[in-house]
Image (tube, helix red, strand yellow):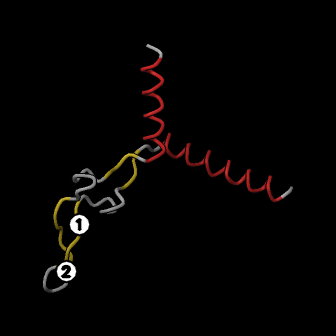
Amino acid sequence: MTPVLGAIACLLAITLGYAALCAASPFGNCRKCRGFGYRLTTDRRGRLKPGRTCRRCRGDRKRIRFGRHLFNLAARIHRDGTR
């Protein structure tokens, strides 16, 4: 197998794997709060305590994956164009 064919096969496998992940689990943990829903802060003693609600996910703890967002956008464009 030539290096170019190997690179194409790897990229295809990664792309199909990510597409399967987006189809099976369209929502992932928020990257900012890591799925807690709030920022962890420390008090004066150094103990962890919940801080403010996460601005990125608004406390929902989950965000839609980028690939799923693209799929939803393409489906919406197709649906609007075929009415």
Q: Residue 50 placed where, x, y %? A: 18, 67
- The residue beneath circle 1 is 39
In the depicted structure, whether residue 10 falls above or below residue 25 = below
Image point (33%, 51%), residue name? 62
Image point 81% across, 59% down: which residue?
3
Mark 1, other Cα within 10 Å: few <14 / some 14–19 / many ≥20: some
Question: Looking at this rendering, what residue extends furthest in the top direction?
Answer: 83
The residue most toward the front is: 81
Q: Circle 2 — which element?
A: loop
Helix, strand or loop at label 1? It is: strand
Q: Calculate the distance from the C-alpha at mark 1 to the C-alpha at mark 2.
A: 14 Å
The mark nearer the N terminus, 1 or 2, is: 1
The answer to whether 15 appears left or right of 70 in the picture is: right
- Residue type indicated by callout 2: Arg
Q: Name the residue under label 2.
A: 47
Q: Residue 23: x, y in percent?
A: 50, 39
Q: Is residue 59 above or below residue 74?
A: below
Image quadrant in which you'd find residue 46: bottom left
Q: Which of 21 and 56 is in front in this view?
A: 56
**Residue pictured at 20% horizontal, 74% vertical:** 41
Q: Quadrant of residue 38?
A: bottom left
Q: Crowding at label 2, few (<14), some or many (≥20) Cα neighbours within 10 Å?
A: few
Indicate which label's residue lies in the foreground, 1 or 2. Answer: 1
Q: Position of residue 58 (x, y in %)?
A: 22, 52
Q: Disc 1 residue type?
A: Arg
Left or right, 72 with reference to 53: right
